[in-house]
Image (spheres, helix red, strand yellow):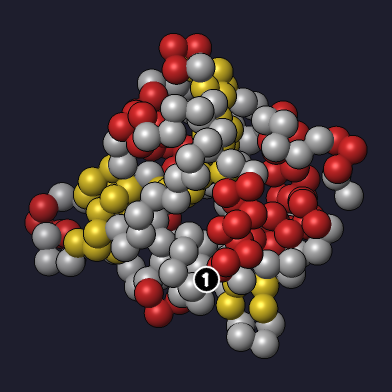
Amino acid sequence: MIQPHTPGNTDQIPVEVHPLQPFLPEKARLLMLGSFPPQRKRWSMDFFYPNIQNDMWRIFGLVFFGDKDYFYDPTARKFRLPLLKAFLTDKSIAIYDTATAIRRLQDNASDKFLDIVTPTDIRKLLSRIPTCHAIAATGQRAADVLSQQLDTPPLQIGKPVKVASLSLTLYRMPSSSRSYPLALSKKADIYRKMFEQEQIITATQTL
């Protein structure tokens, strides 16, 4: 059980500051927001979703290329970062997280054991990508922070929320963590629908 996040039981835990800068293509149309990167020891590259046990880039491979390993180099046991960055830039997809500083209450990457010290200022982040018209929260913790900051009802998978004042559509996506109990193909189907709705991929391009 997680103990209440009070000064008495978290002050001795070191604060981790986000190690990455936001990835913000110049004409980004979609912003994907996770929670916070895993510990450095789990990284295969200096980028978002770096753990080879996380399936985000396999979801992308399935959706856009029909190949879950399109972005993965099995020989080097890491994702193909230059290919990935070029692809995201071409598709106008920005990426960051909903926390800029956290305490890790257990020695793992689970969202439920993250004590958010400093949440990301999402409105300020959006000001850097004025062409963005959609945000995808890639897990429950990210969805909670997003809905709190933008003052919307709780986000649910399969039920986009319009924020008229910001000309934004918000999506709650399934976590790409393998601990999330949904098959990879099912996760890819949900992401595919979101990409279709945002016209990042057309129905005729789906495989």
Occupied quadrant, residue 183? bottom right
In the displayed structure image, the side of residue 68 where residue 151 appears, left or right? left
Q: Residue at x 56, y 68 (%)?
A: 81
Q: Position of residue 3 (x, y in %)?
A: 26, 56
**SS at badge 1:** loop
Residue 80 visible from this viewpoint: yes
Residue corresponding to mark 1: 51
173 in relation to 10, above or below:
above
Q: Residue at x 56, y 58 (%)?
A: 85
Residue most extreme to the top: 165
Q: Residue at x 44, y 69 (%)?
A: 46
Q: Position of residue 126 (x, y in %)?
A: 40, 31
In the displayed structure image, the side of residue 197 where residue 172 appears, left or right? left
Viewer-proximal residue, 57 or 82? 82
In the displayed structure image, the side of residue 33 where residue 180 appears, left or right? right
Indicate the amino acid at tag 1.
Answer: Asn
